[in-house]
Amino acid sequence: MARTTIPAELVAINAIQGTLIADNAITAVHIATNAVSGTLVADNAVTSTHIAQNNVTATQILQNTITVTQLADSAVETAKIAADAVTQAKIADDAVGPDQLAANAVVSASIANGTIVAADLADNAVTLAKMASLARGKIIYGDSAGDPAALAVGSNGQYLTTDGTDISWGAVSGGPTHKTFGTGSIMIGDSTTGTINAADHNTGVGVDIFAALTSGDRNTAMGFGSLLALTTGANNVGYGKDTLASITDTHGNTALGYQCQQNGAGGGYNTSAGYRAGRELTSGSNNVAIGGYALDAATSESGQVAIGHEALTDNATNGSNTAVGYQAGKGITSGASNICIGYQAFDKGTTGYDTIAIGNNCLDNGSAYTGYYNTFVGNGAARLITSAICNTVFGKGALASETAASTNTAVGFEALKTQDGGHGNTAVGSSAGDAITTGDYNTLMGEGAGGAITTSTNNTCYGKAAGADITTSSNNVVIGKNAGLNAADDQGSQVVLGTDLTGIGYHQGILGGVNGVYNQGNSSSFATTSDERIKKNIEDYTLGLDTINDIRVRTFEYRELDEIPNGTDGQILNPNKLPEGQRVGVIAQEIIDVLPSCVKEHANSRLSVATDNVIWTLVKALQEADDKIDALTARVTTLEG
């Protein structure tokens, strides 16, 4: 039968309706190449029932002619489209919407290679469910061409490995060298050892560990060469390269850090942690070394405690030292029984012993320390001490300049801070005695007490700033706040008792109490020693009534301080406030001509009066008066008789 072809120009627009086409009537042979265009097909006219399977190919469809409006919903099914028939050129932009595709209609065979690019896919559009199936256990990876590829499943026990370029399956090796021995013992990293089957509950990790072990129990070695020489020792723990490498039969050692206790062959129960801490301990026991190089020169010492970088690092003999802090006790070589706490505390010590140094930079400067029986507490305290003994120091910067003097006590901030050569001084209080250089045997208590003393000796000052004006004067007793001498360089031997009171001169004393001074006996005088056994050149006193009659008794008032002139030494004749109001007494310049024994002239030309001789002259005068009365009485009796 002859085939008649209807060219497109003979078909009116929208002329072909779905009702005019029998089911499966249109096949590829009925449609000329590029014959079907969008203008010739009515909207929704072509449904799946009108198209025979695989009869619509790319050659039958004019490019960009079939749009959404020409296809009925679900009209295009997989079975209706020949393989590779639908290309980008055949589908108008935005022509195929979700309603135009039947469920599962588009399969990989229906899409020409390279026709769908990334821009055509919505984000997250391709899910695992939309991907082709993959054999169980396979892994998708990029091959040498940059294309996706599937890595087949490896064999049982293999692991995934890479050479830096590709991935592959590799075989698992046998693991590190290891050995089990004894009861509950294991070593990992080495298996060549001595006879160790009798060694129980040991754990080792590293090469050359337990190399000589025979029967030692409960040891732990971690690190190359750790516990290398151990044979029968027990309860040792070594962490780090060469830790406890030389011990053989000792017990209870703990070493943590590179070469900790590396060369120790004896001793026991030592604990060290830090780079080379306790490295040379051989026979020493019960030591603690924590910190890099801590106690690293000690060999046979026992009972040492070194905590801090380079603490007791030079200590080689003797023991029982305790050092805590960076370089604390660093310089001690053979000194024993010392306690050093603080940054560089006692770091210059060599042979000194029985010394306590607590505080940053305490006993840390100058020549080597060889002293003993000293106690120093405070930052920077006693920094320069060398050979001094029996000193006690508490306070920052106290006794900071002393080198060799002994038996001093300095308590308080910078107490005795400049002393260098003074002996037997005691200073208690902030800055007490802080100017003393070579003065000896001064006792100073109170803030700033004796604060100007330099070379003087045997002064006793109690109270805030008591004796603060003394420089070279000695043998003074000054008690009371701001109490002092009349002259800083006075000959001394003054006694000053009272707040803000000033001494009145060499070998004189003054007792404060402008309104009165009382004694417990409520007496106006003090008892004196009058034993004959202490006296000589005993004679009768001859002055009496005539002398008393020549004494002028006066009333007067004391001058104010600004009215009192200076003495011959340039100092005020009387530096202390005197009582107010009218007084009764004598004038020294007058009585000196009558009874000179009761008047004393002092170094500054000041005159003082002692009333003792006046009293005894009064007694003599009374005796003379009594004799005259007796004579007159006898005369009267005679005349009347």
Image (cartoon, rainbow, N blue to C red):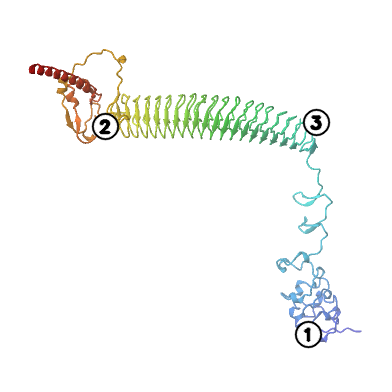
Residue depicted at x 84% and y 77%: 55
Q: Is residue 59 visible?
A: yes
- Which element is circle 1 on? helix
> Residue reaching furthest left?
639
**Mark 2 lies on residue:** 575
Q: Nearer the viewer, residue 405 or 467?
A: 467
**Left or right for 78, reference 308:** right
- Which element is circle 3 on? loop
**Mark 1 lies on residue:** 9
Q: Name the amino acid type tagged 2.
A: Pro
**Left or right for 216, reference 430:** right
Mark 3 or mark 1, which has the lower sequence index? 1
Q: Position of residue 118 (x, y in %)?
A: 72, 66
Q: Position of residue 511 (x, y in %)?
A: 30, 30
Q: Nearer the viewer, residue 121 or 171?
A: 171
Q: Name the amino acid type tagged 3.
A: Thr
